[in-house]
Image: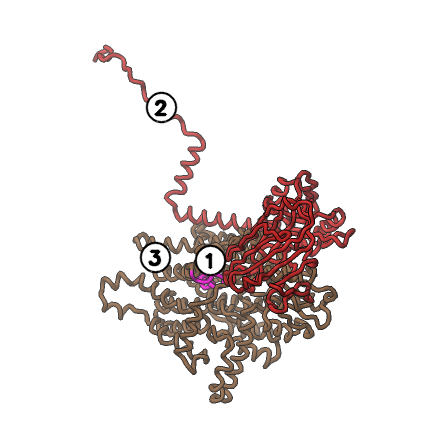
Chain colours: A red, B brown
Amino acid sequence: MSDRPDYLGPSYMLGTPSEPPPTRAQVWRARARRLLWPPTPEVLAALFAATVTGLGGYGLLFAATLSSRLPSPIDWEAAAALVGRDARPGDIVALAPPWAERAREFLPERLPTRPDVPLVTNSFLDYATEELPGVRRVWLVSLPRAPGYSGDIARELASRSTAIDGPQQLGALQVTRYDLQTPMRPLYFFPDRLSSARVQVGEETCAADAAGGLRCAGTPSLRVAREVREVDFLPRACISVVASSDPARPSAIDFPDVPMGRALRGHTGAAGDGGLGAPVAVRLRVRVDGEEVGELEEHPRSPGWHAFQFDTSRFAGRRLPVSFQLSAVQPTREPICLDAMTLP
Amino acid sequence: MNIRSTKTRLAVLLPRSPSRRIALAWSLGVLCIAAATAPAVGISRDESVYLEAAENYAHFWMLAVRSPGKALSLVDRYYAVNREHPGLAKGVYGFTHALLADGLGITGHLQGSRFGAFLFAAVLAGLLSMWGSALAGAWGGSLAPALFFLVPRHFYHAHPAVLDLPETAFWFATAYAYWRSVGGGGDHARSGRWALATGLLFGAAVATKHNGWFLVPLLFGCWLAVALPALLREGPRALSARFPSAFLSMAVFGPLVLFATWPWLWPEPLPRLRDYFAFHLHHENYPWMYLGRLLRDPPFPASYPFVVTALTVPAAILACMCGGLVQSIARIVRSLRGYIEDVSLPTEMLLSANALFPIALIAWPTIPHFGGVKHWMPAMPFLALLGARALVNAGQVLVPRRPSAVTGTLAALALAPAAWQVAHVHPFGTAAWNELAGGAAGAASMGMQRQFWGDNMARVLPVVNGHAAPGARVWFQEATWLAVKEYQRDGRLRGDLAWANGPEDADISIWHYHQEFRDKEFRTWTDFGTARPATGVYLDEVPLVEVYARPGAWR
C-alpha cells in the first residue's frame, strides 16, 4: 500500500472526451431503424397498408376536387364575353394549358364590333420564341388549377410584354391580357394576299378552283392555296404548295406589287404527313424585281417550322414584284407550307 | 310458404361451395353491369370489322348445319372478312347476335353481338374469383375480380365485341387449368381432366388471337424453372414421370381447336397459316403519342408498357398489384434459399411469370406499341390475384385477431377511388388516365395518347341527329363506314346522313382528336371557313371529338 504519487508523475495525456448525448433526431432515427430493419412481416404489411391508404386517400381527394378545378360552361361564357367586349384588331387568344381548345367553342372567331377582323385562338406550346406576326396583344385564357398546368406560357408572355392586365378570375378560368413590347408588324403577309398572285408551272398559268385555291390544268396535283396546315403538330396559316419536280418548269408564285422593307422573312415546313412520305427535298428561290435575294432547301424528314430571312434593305420603301420559285428534286405530291412577310 | 319453397328451389340451383357462390355472383354481376352500360360505348374501328365478320361467320355455320357441302364450297366468301385473326371469339359474337338480335329479337344488333363479349367478361370474373378463393379464401375470391374490373380501361374492355378481353379470359383460364393439372389447389385426383382442359382452353386462346401462342414458352418455362434441379439430379428418366400431361394436351388440342373453329384455314391450311403468322410478324406500326413524342418507327421505348400501366391503373390498385407481385417474388426467393417451406414454388412462379411476361413482351423495342393497355392485358388478372392476396395477408399480419376489418378497410380505400374513376370516365375507356397522371387533363399535358379507334364519337350522335341538315354529308374521320352502317341499322344515327370521304366533300366533320391527324382538322377549318366547333365531346375539358359544320348544315 503506498500513498505515493505515480512515479511517472501526472499524466500529460488528455482524457478521452465522453460521447455527447444523442440528439433527439438521432434517437428517433435509431428507433426507426430498429423498427424497420431487418424488415419483419409486420413492418412490410404496415408499409403496404400505409401505401394503399395514402394512395387511396389521394385518389378520393383527386376525384372529389377535380370538377371544381375545371371550368364550367358559365366560366367559358364569361371569358368569351370579356374577350369579345375588349378585344381589338391585332389581338389573339392564347391557351394554357394548350390542350384547352374547348375555348374555340365559346370564344368569338371575329371581333364582335369588327366582323371583318378575325380573332384567332392559338394552342401553341411555346410563346418564348413564337414570332406572332401582326400581333400586338395576347389574351391568355388559362386553367390554373387544371391537372398538369404549368405557368410557363404566362411567364413567356410576361417576359415579352410591357403591360399586363389581369389576371381576372372567372370561376376556374383566368383571363390575362399581355401587351407585347416589340410587336412584329409586317408590311405585307404573303399568304393573305394569295388571291392577287399569279401562279405558274413553267409557262402554264394556274386558274382559281371552286375551293379557293389555284390549280394547274396540265399538272392537276400541283395546287396552291392559302390554308391552315399542320406543321410539327401546330396550325400554320400558310401557302400550301406542291413543288414541281421538272427543273425546267418550277412552280412559281408571283406577287406583283409588294411594299418592301429591310427584310423578307418567312418559314417553310412539311405540311401534315408530308415529311413522312417519300423523302424529297424542296428548293425555294426568292426573287425581288427579278433579282434573286436568297434560296434555301426544305430538307426531307426534318420536321419543324424553319425560319428564313433575306436582306432586302436595298429595295426598302419601294413596291416591287416578288416571286417564290419552288422545285423538288424528285416528283412529289406532298405540299410545303410556306409563309412569308416583308418587314419594315 | 310459396316464398320459402321458391327460396329452397333457388338454393338447390346455387352451388354449395361458398367460393363457387362468390364466383357465380361475380360472373352474373359483371354480365349485368356490362350489358347495362354497353349502349354508351361506341363502336371502335376494329370492333366494326369484327361485327361484320361475326355475322358472316354465323351465316357460315348456319349454312354448314343445313348444307355442309355448300358451306364448305363457300368458306372463302364467309371467312375472307378479317382473316387476320382466328375465328373463335368472332364466331361467339356471331352466334349471340344470331340468337338474341336476329332470332329472339330481344336486343339490338350491336348489343346482340356484344353479348358474347359480356359472357367472356363474366367468365373471366368467375375464374378470377375461383382462383382468388383458392389462394386467399373468401376475401381473395371477392377482391380479385374487383381489382381487375375497377380499372377503367379493363372495365371498358368488358363491352366491345373485340378480341382482347376474350384473349385475356382464355389466357387466364389456360393458366388456371394448367395450375390445377399440376396439383394446384390440392386436387390431384382430377389432374387428368384439368390437363385435358388446359389443351382445349389453350386452343381457344390461340383460336382467339395470336398472343395465345406465347403461353407455350411461358408455361413450359415456369415448369422447367421448378423441375430443372430434380431433372438434373434424377436424369432423363425423371422427365417422363415429371413432365406435365397438360403440355401434351396443349400440343394436340391447341392446333385442333384453332383449325376446327377457323374454317378459313380449311382449304389451304399451311399457306394460310404462313400468311397469318407473316402478317403479325410484320405488323404495321401505327403512330402513337407517348410523353410528347409521336412514336412512328422502332425502336420504341422499352418503358412504354410499364409507364402506361403505372399511369392508367388507379393508384391504390396499382399499389396492391405491385405489393402482391413483390410479395410473390420475395416468396420465390426465400423458398429457393430455403428460408420458408410452406410456399408452393410452382404456384408463385406461375403467378409472377404471368404477371410480368405479357408486359415485358410488349416492352421489346421492335414490337408495335399502340392500343393502350390491351396488348398486355393478359398480365392484369394475375396482378389482380396477387394484389388480392396481398390485401388479405396484410390483414392477417397486422391484426391477426380481426384480419377482415383491416383487409376490408384497405380494400375499400383501394377500390372506392377506382370505382369513382370508372363511373367518371365511362364510356371513354380509351381516354382513361389515373390520378398519378392527373386524369385526362394531366395526361394531355404530358403528351400522352388521348384516345384511339374512334368509338368516342357515339356521344355526339344524338346531337348530330338533332342538328344536322337533312341529307347532310358527314365525314366521320376515324369511325369506319362499317361502324356508321351499324349505328344506322340500330337507329342510333339518322339514315339520311350520307358518308363523306373527307372534309372537302362534307357538310359536317366529326373530328376525333389524334395528334397524327391534326392536319385533317386544320384542313377542315380551311374548307369550312371556321375553326369553331358546333359541339364536342370533352373529358375533364380535354377535347376528344369536335364537330364542325359548314354554314347552313347545322340547324
Residue A26 at x, y percent in the picture: 42, 33
Residue A280: percent from left, percent from top:
51, 60
Compute the Cα span from label 2 to label 1.
57 Å
User: Which residue is at the far right?
Assistant: A113
Q: Are marks 2 and 1 on the same chain?
A: no
Mark 1: few/some/many CA within 10 Å (<14, 14-19, 20+): many
Q: Which residue is more in the foreground, A137 or A204?
A: A204
Question: Could you tell me which chain the residue with mark 1 belongs to?
Answer: B
If you read the primary sequence from the N terminus, does the residue marked by circle 1 or circle 3 appear first?
1
For numbered disc 2, what is the local secondary structure?
Answer: loop
Q: Which residue is mark 1?
A: B305
Q: Which residue is mark 3?
A: B342
Tell me the kind of residue under disc 2: Ser
Q: Is residue B541 visible?
A: no
- In the rendered structure, are the residues bearing label 2 and label 3 in contact, judged by CB atoms less than 8 Å apart? no
Residue under numbered circle 2: A18
**In the image, are marks 2 and 3 on the same chain?**
no
Q: CA distance from mark 1 to mark 3?
A: 34 Å
Which residues lie in the magenta part?
B366-383
Q: Amino acid at mark 1?
A: Pro
The mark tally for this picture is: 3
Judge depth for marks 1 and 3 and give the one in front: 1
Label 2 environment density (alpha carbons within 10 Å; few <14, some 14–19, many ≥20): few
Quarter the C terminus of chain A occupies: top right
> Which amino acid type is marked by label 3?
Asp
Q: Chain of mark 3?
A: B
Question: Picture coordinates of residue A27 (x, y %)?
Answer: 42, 33
Residue B76 at what x, y percent from top left? 48, 82
Is residue A111 within the magenta segment? no
Q: Quadrant of the N terminus of chain A?
A: top left
Circle 1 sits in a helix, a strand or a loop, which is it? Answer: helix
- Using the rendered view, name the quadrant where residue B328 is placed: bottom left
